[in-house]
Image: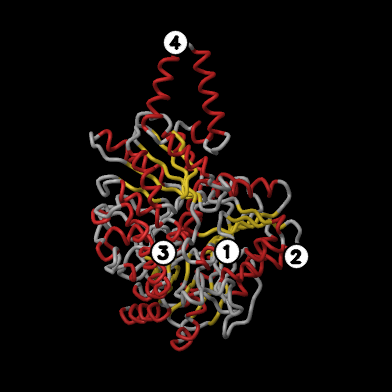
């Protein structure tokens, strides 16, 4: 029998199928997704959960004329498959391949890029308003998961959208953790279809007009309607925002979902559809452990993944998690906070051992820091574990709630620097720039795992805000040739003294350069502190070498290298030349961390080659 999926080259092909063929197509999409991602690595469980929704949306709506805006985008693999990217899915998250999330212009279906949570409703509202202003008849749909609904931006957008009663906009809440509704009963499903029926809408609106001259009776009727709906539906909140709430409905019944969407499409105004799905649907291991199968390495679908980290895990993240448990056992004031990244930030063990001292605020990064300020003011020591790219969202609170108030809070900044396959939205390359500008904030960059623990210990003892920034990679336990030295505020570590060139390193590149620097007899310095900068070691390096080289895994504009150059000019340290090695002024696309660093010549061989060439040119 011919494959249905082989006949789908874009969404218009999908709309040529009958509704009865849609379940078979969904099965093929799900099989394609499991087969491909198990070979390439990538996001799996989220996409498996929205196969039916994706098929139904493209079947009912005239995409790309009509707009579908996905939140985050890790669930968009089925969307990519159905919009002409099936053959290319094997390249996703790879250098030169498909983008990890939704990327503006990757296809005619993708008007906006996304990678962070809670943006879809606001973007969709803007598109709908633009279409109305331009006189276009496009329909706009925003899809948002219940996890993303913990983000304040989603509610800001809902609140704003409610002021446009005549705007044709559909919000679909994909509830895959049953955090809002625990079951989908037949009564609720039947009422959802009634509420989406145009005849029901006309009846209600007509009744409102008839009763408009009898305010008391009209108010009584409206309240009776709300109470009747509220007995079987959890949508009162969204009704208060001004949306017509429909749901909850089974998000895996593609035929019924398609019929419901057809009815909703015919309705005017603001609509809110609540569907319930199962993350990882159709692949038993992912259904049982959707967190483990959210983002996966390559694996054998028959045997599945190892659900727990392997004992040889030498990542900086795991070293942080180990330290946090150790410190908490000795210090009852330690509190661990994460914005929905318990596993990614290696706080899983801490959450089990110290459940009363672990706080997951959901996808609410700014709230995480505001909460931390209250905890700190109350005499506790919060440790906020947060990805570098997510910390961007909380920048105001770094200034307002941490630094200005000079509170003892530790920022454990994971995924600092080049991250890799998740692409531009997740590269942690801007943190050193935007954090350096903030007074009262100490910033440290460990080179090895033991140093990370020492810096975190320093931060926990420090009675002021402190940030420890580390990369998404494995690290070495310690330096090969240098003895451990204590962490002292604003003091660098001289790893070896050589001639001609002094390499001032921030982060793991200090360890990576050990052998190559020794082979050329270059001075190697582990700078440790981005702020306060060890200006004494910079001065010494400039006075005793022909070339001073600053090396950081962050963007060059506004980076620490510019401060070093400025200091050398101010101090008239012009006898030595200066070279600033950092990331270029462009967004870094999908590739592995090592591929990106190699291409930019910011890995150890690339750095040494640049230094050699510069010395030869002097």
x, y percent for residue 245: 46, 36
- Mark 1 is surrounded, within 10 Å at the Cα level, by few (under 14), some (14 to 19) or many (20 or more) other residues, namely some
Mark 3 element type: loop
Residue 569 can be seen, yes or no: no
Left or right relative to 536: residue 21? left
Furthest-bottom residue in this view: 519
Which mark is first along the chain, 3 or 2?
A: 2
Residue under label 4, please give it: 213
Mark 1 element type: loop
Q: Are marks 4 and 2 in contact (CB under 8 Å)?
A: no
Cα–Cα span, label 1 and label 4: 58 Å
Mark 4 element type: helix
Which mark is first along the chain, 4 or 1?
A: 4
Which mark is first along the chain, 4 or 3?
A: 4
Q: Return the mark for residue 422.
A: 3
Left or right relative to 435: residue 403? right
Furthest-top residue in this view: 213
Left or right relative to 585: residue 48? right
Cα–Cα span, label 4 and label 2: 68 Å
Cα–Cα span, label 3 and label 4: 58 Å
For image coordinates 49% across by 74% down, the residue present is 541
Q: Are marks 2 and 3 in contact (CB under 8 Å)?
A: no
For image coordinates 33% across by 39% down, the residue present is 265
Residue under label 2, please give it: 329
Residue under label 1, please give it: 343
Q: Are marks 1 and 4 in contact (CB under 8 Å)?
A: no
Label 4 vs label 2, nearer the camera:
4
In this rendering, is residue 234 above or below 491?
A: above
Which mark is first along the chain, 3 or 1?
A: 1
- Mark 4 is surrounded, within 10 Å at the Cα level, by few (under 14), some (14 to 19) or many (20 or more) other residues, namely few
For image coordinates 45% across by 37% down, the residue present is 158
């Amino acid at each position: 029998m011919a494959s249905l999926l082989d006949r789908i080259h874009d969404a218009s092909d999908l709309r040529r199928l009958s509704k009865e063929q849609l379940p078979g197509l969904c099965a093929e999409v799900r099989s394609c997704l499991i087969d491909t991602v198990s070979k390439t690595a990538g996001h799996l469980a989220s996409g498996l959960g929205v196969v039916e929704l994706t098929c139904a949306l493209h079947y009912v709506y005239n995409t790309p004329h009509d707009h579908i805006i996905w939140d985050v985008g890790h669930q968009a693999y089925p969307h990519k498959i159905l919009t002409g990217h099936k053959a290319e899915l094997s390249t996703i998250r790879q250098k030169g391949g498909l983008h990890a999330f939704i990327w503006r212009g990757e296809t005619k279906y993708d008007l906006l890029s996304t990678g962070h949570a809670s943006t879809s409703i606001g973007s969709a509202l803007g598109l709908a308003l633009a279409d109305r202003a331009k006189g276009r008849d496009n329909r706009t749909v925003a899809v948002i998961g219940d996890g993303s609904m913990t983000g304040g931006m989603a509610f800001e957008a809902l609140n704003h959208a409610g002021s446009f009663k005549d705007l044709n906009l559909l919000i679909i809440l994909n509830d895959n953790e049953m955090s809002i509704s625990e079951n989908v009963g037949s009564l609720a499903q039947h009422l959802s279809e009634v509420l989406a029926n145009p005849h029901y809408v006309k009846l209600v609106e007509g009744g409102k007009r008839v009763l408009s001259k009898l305010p008391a009776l009209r108010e009584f009727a409206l309240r009776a309607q709300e109470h009747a709906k509220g007995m079987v539906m959890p949508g009162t909140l969204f009704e208060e925002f001004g949306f017509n709430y429909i749901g909850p409905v089974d998000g895996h019944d593609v035929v019924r979902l398609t019929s419901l969407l057809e009815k909703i499409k015919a309705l005017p105004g603001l609509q809110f559809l609540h569907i319930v799905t199962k993350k990882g649907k159709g692949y038993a291991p992912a259904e049982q452990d959707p967190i483990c199968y959210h983002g996966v390495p390559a694996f054998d679908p028959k045997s599945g993944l190892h659900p727990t980290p392997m004992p040889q895990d030498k990542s900086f993240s795991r070293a942080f998690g180990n330290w946090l448990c150790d410190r908490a056992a000795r210090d009852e004031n330690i509190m661990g906070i994460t914005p929905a990244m318990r596993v990614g930030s290696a706080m899983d063990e801490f959450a089990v051992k110290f459940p009363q001292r672990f706080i997951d605020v959901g996808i609410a990064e700014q709230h995480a820091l505001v909460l931390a300020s209250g905890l700190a003011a109350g005499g506790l020591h919060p440790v906020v574990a947060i990805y570098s790219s997510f910390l961007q969202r909380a920048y105001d609170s770094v200034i307002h709630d941490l630094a200005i108030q000079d509170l003892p809070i530790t920022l454990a900044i994971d995924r600092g620097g080049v991250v890799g396959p998740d692409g531009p939205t997740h590269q942690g390359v801007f943190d050193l720039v935007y954090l350096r500008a903030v007074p009262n904030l100490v910033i440290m960059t460990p080179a090895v795992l033991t140093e990370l623990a020492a810096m975190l210990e320093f931060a926990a003892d420090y009675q002021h805000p402190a940030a420890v920034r580390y990369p998404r990679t494995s690290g070495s336990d310690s330096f090969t040739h240098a003895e451990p030295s204590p962490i002292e505020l604003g003091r660098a570590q001289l790893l070896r003294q050589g001639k001609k060139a002094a390499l001032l390193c921030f982060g793991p590149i200090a360890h990576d350069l050990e052998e190559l620097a020794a082979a050329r007899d270059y001075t190697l310095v582990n700078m440790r502190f981005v702020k306060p900068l060890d200006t004494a070691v910079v001065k010494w390096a400039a006075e005793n070498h022909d070339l001073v080289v600053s090396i950081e895994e962050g963007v060059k504009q506004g980076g620490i290298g510019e401060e070093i150059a400025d200091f050398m000019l101010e101090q008239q340290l012009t006898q030595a030349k200066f070279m600033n090695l950092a990331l270029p002024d462009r967004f870094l696309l999908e590739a592995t961390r090592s591929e990106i660093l190699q291409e930019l010549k910011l890995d150890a061989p690339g750095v040494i080659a640049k230094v050699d060439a510069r010395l030869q040119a002097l």
